[in-house]
Amino acid sequence: MSPTTAAVTERVRARLRAERTDPSAHPDEARRIAQFEVRRHNDHALARGTATIDDEAACVRDILAGVAGYGPLQPLLEDDTIEEIWLNGPSRVFIAREGRSERVPIALTEAQLRDVVERMLHSTGRRVDIGQPFVDASLPDGSRLHVAIADVVHGSWAVNIRRFLPRYRSLDSLVAQGMVPASVGVMLSDAMRAGRSVVVSGPTHAGKTTLLAALVAECREQRVITVEETFELGVQAPDLVALQGRQASLEGTGEITLRRLVKEALRMRPDRLVVGEVRDAEALDLVLALNTGIPGAATVHANSAAEALDKLTMLPLLAGRNIDRAFIAPALAASVDLVVHCRREADGTRRVAEVIEPLGVDAGGRITHRVIHAEPEPYASSGMFRHRGVA
């Protein structure tokens, strides 16, 4: 938003407050006020000989997106205790707090749901339509938006908004919240500052991205290049470049993959390369980058730290038939220093369940490791506990 548009937006917001007009409940009145203020700005600009707003309609759209918020969902987005919001259609709205989900008494119409999604996508440059029924985008506050529309989804649209709360943005805060044991927090902080490569593993909603962002925040003296499909990490650092992939156009052109971004990142003089999530052939490019001596950090979906290593030896095989696991496993064992595994407990809390250190490769081609930290894991069907052994 340009300084001129921002100034007009503030005048519109002030009038809405003075006239007690809710732009979500009275969109036509909000639009009338926005149009009036844009035209008044242009009248004054012409009289004073200053710059005018050339595209009044586009400016009005930007102003309404800024003042109207996201309708019935706005109070949820302003609640700092809510970690995720999802809609299974307009009348079924759910939230997650501290890992536990609950349904909230909010109902939208089909028109409201589509209007909210359009507003959310307005500033992202992304779209969702019949030709492209899925979309991932980052909202201005750093939240991740995922939308799937009918008829890919049965019935209405499905919307997920995953939020990354400020109070979980540092290792100290995660230690204070109980996710990371204090001794493990010190060890991980030292590892990141010393330029060691760390992989964060875990199942969905276990806190992998949150922990990775906190780890990257420890790299204050390093030039960090982050690579993500959609901006999620939200790391603030003195010397940081954040790269984001791009979906293909309707013509099937213009796609920017994680593999391409990893290769481009290597040309940007990184002191540390960060891949938000490794899930495909980009694993090969990451392993090759780590073997050039560049420290890295990434997340991967897995049920244990050892399984994460196994998965990272398999994913590079997707890059082509000439890739051999006999090469990948030793290269990975030599370049990854720590694997940190996150777990979500039955009560919704997240914890660092184990930390392992890769040692080498055994005769069967599997990466061996040493357990540095491990917590008991409860069986799903009983109160018994077990510890993971050393591979």
Image (cartoon, rainbow, N blue to C red):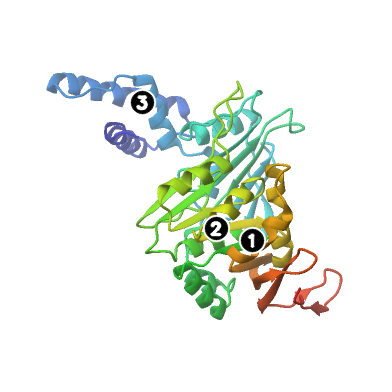
Q: Residue at x 41, y 37 (%)?
A: 67
Residue 59: mark in rendering = 3
- Residue kind at label 1, given as amino acid type: Leu
Characterize the local packing of mark 2: few (<14), some (14-19) or many (20 or more) Cα atoms within 10 angstroms.
Answer: many
Q: Residue at x 45, y 43 (%)?
A: 140
- Taking the image as shown, residue 33 lies to the left or right of residue 299, namely left
Q: Quadrant of residue 43?
A: top left
What is the residue that sits farthest to the left in this orientation? Answer: 48
Label 1: element kind: helix
Q: Residue at x 71, y 29 (%)?
A: 150
Q: CA distance from mark 3 to mark 1?
A: 51 Å
User: Eyeballing the image, is 195 above or below 88?
Assistant: below
Characterize the local packing of mark 1: few (<14), some (14-19) or many (20 or more) Cα atoms within 10 angstroms.
Answer: many
Q: Quadrant of residue 212?
A: bottom right
Q: Earlier in the sequence, mark 3 or mark 1?
A: 3
Q: Quadrant of the N terminus?
A: top left
Residues at badges 3 and 2 in contact (C-beta under 8 Å)?
A: no
Which mark's residue is nearer the viewer, 3 or 1?
Answer: 1
In the picture of the structure, the residue carrying the numbered disc 2 is 290
User: Eyeballing the image, is 360 above or below 33?
Assistant: below
The percent position of residue 19, horizontal first and vertical second, equals 35, 35
What is the residue that sits farthest to the right in this orientation? Answer: 381
Q: CA distance from mark 3 to mark 2?
A: 46 Å
Q: CA distance from mark 1 to mark 2?
A: 8 Å
In the picture of the structure, the residue carrying the numbered disc 1 is 332
Residues at badges 1 and 2 in contact (C-beta under 8 Å)?
A: yes
Front position in the image: 277 or 196 = 196
